[in-house]
Image (spheres, rainbow, N blue to C red):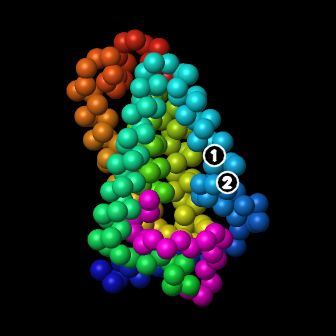
Amino acid sequence: MEALIDLDRKLFLALNGAHSPTWLDSFFISLTRDETLLSRLLILGLFLFLLFRSPGWRRRALWLLPLIAIVDSLNSQVLKEIFMRPRPCHELYEGMKLLVDCGPAYSFPSSHAANMGAVGIFLALGAKTQVVRIAILALPLLIAYSRIHVGVHYPADVFFGFLEGAILAMVWDALLRFLPARIRILKAGEKPIRDSI
């Protein structure tokens, strides 16, 4: 186990400590901080797009809200309290860069990554084509990675957080298919056709 933790630490320092241009640092700071204008506009824009896209996407957008609440609560109030891993910014390794406030919470797993895994996979499951699924996943993956770049999470925190969110999204999607027809999530290709991209 200690060897894996050491490998994770080395990978963190390689990714976080690598020289990057100022514009890239600014980009990841904007993605990772919930209170920035860019983050708020992206979230609001995506939600409004889904609400007005079609009835099927509207259902998916509305069912996304309780999924995020479940994932975030499980991650922040249960898993982090079990593992109690300090954030890398609490360790302050030589050569690392810290671009945002460190935060008081524990590190493993990353709540940002868990939430993004849930959002990305749950929305991707509603897409009809592989190209659209990949496009949907691009932003959540960037946001998850940003946590390493800004210095507040190790790679394992992000990987397992994203995996946690993805698994919960798949379970949520499967459960919602058993609801009454007027509110359940539609299967890929299921009519009405306009409910899928």
Q: Is residue 197 above or below residue 111?
A: above
Q: Are marks 1 and 2 in contact (CB under 8 Å)?
A: yes
Magenta stretch: includes residue 170 = no
Q: Residue at x 68, y 48 (%)?
A: 38
Q: Please state which of residues 70 and 128 is positioned toward the viewer in this rendering.
A: 70
Q: Secondary structure at mark 1?
A: helix
What residue is disc 1 on?
40
**Horizontal and vertical percent position of residue 187:** 33, 23
Quarter holding residue 7: bottom left
Few, some or many residues within 10 Å of mark 2 (<14, 14–19, 20+): few
Magenta span: chief secondary structure:
loop
Q: Residue at x 33, y 70 (%)?
A: 81
Q: Residue at x 48, y 57 (%)?
A: 112
Q: Which residues are magenta?
A: 93-111
> Is 104 on the left-hand or right-hand side of 188?
right
Which residue reaches farthest left?
A: 178
> Which kind of residue does numbered mark 1 sit on?
Arg
**Horizontal and vertical percent position of residue 122:** 40, 38
* Residue 101 visible (yes or no): yes
Q: Please state which of residues 102 and 3 is positioned toward the viewer in this rendering.
A: 102
**Horizontal and vertical percent position of residue 84:** 35, 75
Q: Residue at x 56, y 73 (%)?
A: 102
> Is 182 on the left-hand or right-hand side of 36?
left
Label for residue 36? 2
Which residue reaches farthest top?
A: 192
**Horizontal and vertical percent position of residue 93:** 56, 85
Q: Secondary structure at mark 2?
A: loop
Total numbered badges shown on the rendered structure: 2
* Residue 124 visible (yes or no): no
Q: Quadrant of the N terminus?
A: bottom left
> Which kind of residue does numbered mark 2 sit on?
Thr
Q: Please state which of residues 129 and 86 is positioned toward the viewer in this rendering.
A: 86
